[in-house]
Amino acid sequence: MVMRQGKSALMFLFAQQENLTKTAQEVAQSGWLGLGVADWCVLAVYFVVILVVGLWSMTKVSDISDFFMGGRRFGKVFMMFFAFGSGTSSEQAISVVAGTWRAGLAGIWWQFLWLWATPFYWLVAPVMRRMRALTTADFFEHRFNTPTATLYTIYGIIMAIVFIAAGLFSSGKMVDALTGGELEVLAQQLDVQVPTAEYSEDDSFVGMTTRPLKGYEYAILAMTTLFVIYGMAGGLGAAIITDFIQGILTIIFSFLLLPFVFNMVGGFGALQAGSQIKSGMLNLAADPAVAESLGKEPITYFYVCMLAITAMAGIVVQPHIMGVCGAGKTEFEGRFGFTVGNFLKRICTIAWTFTGLACILWYLGDNSPLQQTDPDLYRDVQVRNNPEEYNSLPPAEQERIDKADKDFSDSLFGRAAFEILPTISPGLIGLLLASLLAAVMSTSDAQMVIGSGLFTENIYKKFIAKNRSDKHYLWVGRIAGLLIVMLALILQTSFEDVIHALQVIIKTPAAIGISFWFGIAWRRWNALAVWASTFAAVGTWWFVSNMGGSLSSILPESMFKNDGKSMYDVYQMLFYMGVGTSVGIAVSLLTPRMPQEKLDKFFRLIHTPITPGEYVAEPCTLPANPAPQEHTLFKHPDIELPRLTLTDISGFLLAWAAVATLIGVTVWLSNHA
């Protein structure tokens, strides 16, 4: 009976399917690159506005504090949208939709994993603002020493490169889908060859060869050109101002497709009726047995817990977070922007997830548009979601179908938009595309500026050219930002799919993030512990992800995938987080502590509130007339936990209430659809 109701709901309004397919094809044929005149007009307006704002911001840049920290002049609304824009990129929406396609409702955890960390943003943001730092490397310099700051600088630049690369990779895929594949057709016609490295397993040799530039990579180059121009011109100030505009567009991007794709499957009520189309589709935690049969990572509650711990460890050392917390007028602007801006992102995550669920009904259903546009792909995705049929195929055929399903899920958001929005109104594709560009560029510009700040302040200024003019350092920062983006363009070619890109983002910061948390709470954690903990975590990560199979004989079989050689991602995180923390604690206890005077100076800094309009000449120093120092939670020679104020406690509890509300709304929607 349920199956009959599901099919009935899925067939509702599908009589228009043939007209819809024709409309998408007509749009692709009527304009350049699959976009109509109205779409190009919307994009033109967006490009002009963003460039004008970015170039205008250049007039506000007079010194390196303006460029790297926006002059610390922004209020709550701008800080909220800066936190939202710099932390929300289109690859996150795409990865959630792709994850939902693969795991059902449980795919929401690819972004909800940060949900558990969000209340702590309310508490940690004032601490970061009180550091009075330009970059996170300043924290490592003044809490530990110069070599440690250099370690973070290198690590932070790598993080910035990874984040930019992941955002560009995923967004390029979606832009190509929004053009109906016309970009790929153009790429084949132009046939521009680019150098690439190629590894031969037979000869164990890496050689250089060439390959044609792909369609989505043309989109990546176009996006990169735009955000590099205004980001290099106006620095973090330009990023914050444009993030206000782009944050609004990102919200539009998140919700624009949702009502239309549900309309195509017969309304929101079709979700519950058609949930049998995919096993475990509406389960908040994926069924491990189903996931294993499909060769997927089981999204269990333990996996979600490890994702959250890893994300919490890493979020505070992401290069742009010091700017997110530190560019406001006072510490309240930072904590309000960091917390509320990220809750906006969590709300958008719900919209992305339910868009993905509707796409499952549409593309896997009996009236899937793929049956007309690409019947071979329709067959492949059907097989990939049928464990019994998939497992009966030879390995080579499984690999081919696996790749087809991954490619389809990566472009799912864009593909659905291309096939639906032209039937609603001219210009909607252009609006969605502008919103998509806004989402990725608002993240990439911040990462570029913060990454260049790390290099300029903590490497170039200290070791290469001291005592130069601010103008000199400004131009070094701009050139460094350009080089960071170029490296990101190279790195994005190595990603397999959007989920793989997101996994790299989650894991990269956590290794050194362990030292941040211990550094602000425990005096015993010293510089040697930072080095030992970071290298132990990174080394363990490399070992368990590449050679984890060598441990299969001494560890439980449940920790490994079906092949018995690859360790599940959740246990990889457990190992490298556990080893990194244990090694750091052991080294801290066995080696001398940092000088007492250095520790007293640092902890006095982070326990001294920001006063409105205070002026600090050098990073991580107190103003001439600082506010009274706040007390710690309890007196202990090594533990430095601040005593919580009424504002701390009330905001923290309200944030947890928001967490419970978001999870409750998600569950309620899935049960009452």
Image (cartoon, rainbow, N blue to C red):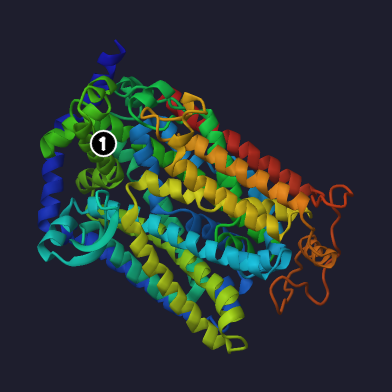
Q: Residue furthest right?
A: 635
For this rendering, which residue is in front, 158 or 299?
A: 158
Secondary structure under tag 1 reads helix
Q: Considering depth in this image, is 536 or 106 the residue closer to the camera?
A: 536
Would you say 311 lies left or right of 251 here? right
Residue at the (29%, 53%) spot, across then down? 204
What x and y, as percent, mark residue 147? 64, 68
Is any part of residue 594 visible from this angle?
Answer: yes
Q: At 60% across and 54% down in the image, what residue appears?
A: 534
Q: Is residue 373 above or below residue 125?
A: above
Residue 240 located left or right of residue 368: right
| Left or right, 27 with reference to 671 | left
* Image quarter of the N terminus: top left
Query: Label 1 sits on what residue type?
Result: Asp
Q: Is residue 457 above or below residue 279?
A: below
Q: Position of residue 19 (x, y in %)?
A: 12, 39
- Residue 402 sits above or below residue 491 on the image: above
From this viewpoint, is residue 672 visible? no
Residue holding disc 1:
402
Q: Name the foreground residue: 239 vs 568.
A: 568
Q: Residue 234 location in percent, x, y? A: 48, 76
Does 285 sit left or right of 188 as displayed?
Answer: right
Say which of 602 and 12 sits in front.
602
Extreme residue toward the front, this view: 203
Residue at 60% in and 77% down? 65
Percent across and percent down for residue 659 are 59, 38
Q: Which quarter of the figure is the C terminus placed in? A: top left
